[in-house]
Image (cartoon, rainbow, N blue to C red):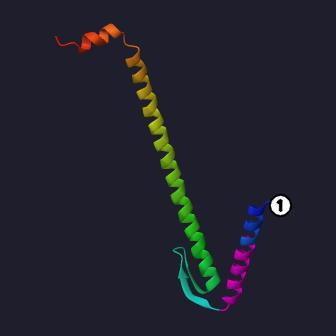
Amino acid sequence: MNLPRVIAAVALLIVTLAIIGFAIINAGPTVESINLGIGRYYDVPVVVALFIAFVVGVIVTLLYCLYYFIDLGLTVRRIKKKNKQLERELVAIRNLPLEESLEETEPA
């Protein structure tokens, strides 16, 4: 038996039961109104209001993560391109004949 999977399954079960219990306890109270920008809703249950807030938070977080990973990928690409350019320069410098490099360093 895989102990980490069992612990994760038990934790998921506990969280699920806590959410269900919270929803049952707060089934009666309502929020006067919620303005979502696309419309105003009246007498919304607290559980639904919290769920809407959660979903909006998840969407905003996903959009931010998408932007972050795209930016990170572009940065890695730029750094790899610069690294290849520097490696080409290094190979060119290593391939210079020794006599030419000595002539360049000697004062005239």
User: Which region of the structure is painted magenta?
Assistant: 12-28
Indicate yes or no whether the magenta region holds residue 16: yes
Horizontal placement of 20 versus 72: left or right?
right
In the displayed structure, 14 sits above or below 6; it is: below
Q: Residue at x 37, y 13 (%)?
A: 96
Taking depth in this image into account, of 81 and 53 the one nearest to the observer is: 81
Main secondary structure along the magenta-highlighted residues: helix
Q: Pointer 1: residues within 10 angstroms few (<14), some, or many (20+)?
A: few
Q: Where does the image place residue 75, in percent across and percent down from the top left?
A: 46, 43
Q: Quadrant of residue 11?
A: bottom right
Residue with the mark numbered 1: 1
- Outermost residue to the top: 99
- Dividing the picture into quarters, in which one does residue 52 lie? bottom right
What number of labels is visible?
1
97 vs 17, left or right, is: left
Q: Quadrant of the N terminus?
A: bottom right
Q: Going 70% across and 75% down the picture, which residue do you hit?
A: 15
In the rendered view, tell whether residue 97 sits above or below residue 63: above
Type of residue at label 1? Met
Q: Nearer the viewer, residue 3 or 89?
A: 3
Give percent across and percent down for residue 18.
Answer: 70, 80
Give the residue furthest to the left. Answer: 108
Q: Residue at x 55, y 86 (%)?
A: 33
Quadrant in which the C terminus appears = top left
Image quadrant assignment for residue 66: bottom right
Q: Which of 91/69 is in front?
A: 91
Q: Position of residue 90 (x, y in %)?
A: 40, 23
